[in-house]
Amino acid sequence: MTTLMTASARQAKPADFLPLFGTDFIEFYVGNAKQAAHYYKSAFGFQSLAYSGPETGVKNKVSYALRQNKMTFVFTTALRTGNAIADHVYLHGDGIKIIALMVEDAETAWKETTKRGGKPYMEPTVLKDEFGELHLSGIYTFGETVHLFVDRTKYNGPFMPGYRAWETTYNPSATGLQFVDHCVGNVGWNQMEPWVRFYEEVMGFKNILSFDDEDISTEYSALMSKVMSNGNGYVKFPINEPAEGKKKSQVEEYLEFFNGEGVQHVAMATNNILETVTDLKNRGVEFLRVPSSYYTELRKRVGTIDEDVTSLGELGILVDRDEEGYLLQIFTKPVEDRPTLFFEIIQRKGAKSFGKGNFKALFEAIEREQEARGNL
């Protein structure tokens, strides 16, 4: 009996010590939050949600929260120098500081992750106002990036205490973006494995996919990547590291201009990529392009798909297939003057992978942009 119980225990699925239910919000530290918010409303179709600043009792910074379907972006600017927000923008340029994750218990999330080696960012904290109480905690991850744990079960305000509803007459229509599919981090030389271990040991993630420099390489550059996912698959973080190549890789360029490790891009899901990308292009969003020859053998490579290949080619949308279906994806050019942050638009039709079949065409397109900037 003892032997059978021991075997059964070994086969039992371990409990998830950090249940996550998706991305709560992503916070950007920027030089001008008002203008950044206007750009994301105009270009990407986000809607005004909430505002925090001197008028709400917050004296040292301003923040604008925007929402589109299940995605919330927050843009924060320091009002004075000599603080963490101003220093972050000076060093890195506009970039992502916080990836906030939905949890059922922020205090437990903090205790479980810090006892496993997570570096504390915010001890368990309760914020209160007339709408209830919001429970927060947080730890650091790669670079200066933070994972904030957010428990909203006792809060029903517009966003969080310290914010008020932000109502504007200018609210461009949404573009069909639904939720955060994944966020990609760039880390330094020989740092991918330590951060893989961090997500495994501190946050209980699994390495679900790995790509080496044979998978992700061109004539000139290469990188390596591992995809980390939490237990239910709601939160996924691919981690990129440079690899040796003839010239500077996109990850090396990012690390140089960001001055360190950080979030390279956010993938935003849509239910109709043709409509979404058409709308985004009409609003001025610029996308990477691959050669027209990419589409010549597309059906032979990926099989039958619902979309018209000519339409995909006109927009520059890429397609890849795995054992469970296919996906469609496209990548913007950097959305700032530093060649750092960009966005991916993705539609999954069963596929759970990340477009391995598109890597070569995509990275050659990135290299053409690097060469134009003089950074290849």
Image (cartoon, rainbow, N blue to C red):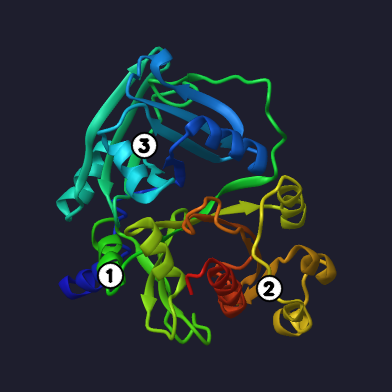
Q: Is residue 111 above or below residue 256?
A: above
Q: Residue at x 44, y 54 (%)?
A: 235
User: Is 359 on the left-hand or right-hand side of 85?
Assistant: right
Q: Secondary structure at mark 3?
A: strand
Q: Please state the horizontal and vertical placement of residue 27, each as a whole percent of the image.
A: 43, 40
Q: Earlier in the sequence, mark 3 or mark 1?
A: 3
Q: What kind of residue is marked 2?
A: Val
User: Is 210 on the left-hand or right-hand side of 87?
Assistant: right
Q: Secondary structure at mark 2?
A: loop
User: Is 326 on the left-hand or right-hand side of 214?
Assistant: right
Q: Is residue 156 visible?
A: no
**Crowd rating for badge 1 (residues with CA inside 10 Å; few <14, some 14–19, many 20+):** some
**Crowd rating for badge 2 (residues with CA inside 10 Å; few <14, some 14–19, many 20+):** many
The answer to the question of whether label 3 and label 1 lie on touching residues, with beta carbons closer than 8 A, is no
Instruction: Between residue 101 and residue 40, name the one nearer to us.
Output: 40
Q: CA distance from mark 3 to mark 2?
A: 39 Å
Q: Is residue 321 visible?
A: yes
Q: What kind of residue is marked 3?
A: Val
The answer to the question of whether label 1 and label 2 lie on touching residues, with beta carbons closer than 8 A, is no
Q: Secondary structure at mark 1?
A: loop
Q: What kind of residue is marked 1?
A: Gln
* Residue under numbered circle 2: 290
Q: Which mark is residue 191?
A: 1
Q: Earlier in the sequence, mark 3 or mark 2?
A: 3
**Crowd rating for badge 3 (residues with CA inside 10 Å; few <14, some 14–19, many 20+):** many
Q: Residue at x 67, y 51 (%)?
A: 285
Q: Please state the horizontal and vertical placement of residue 326, each as a whole percent of the image.
A: 66, 70
Q: Residue at x 53, y 56 (%)?
A: 342
Q: Is residue 1 above or below residue 67?
A: below
Q: Which mark is residue 150?
A: 3
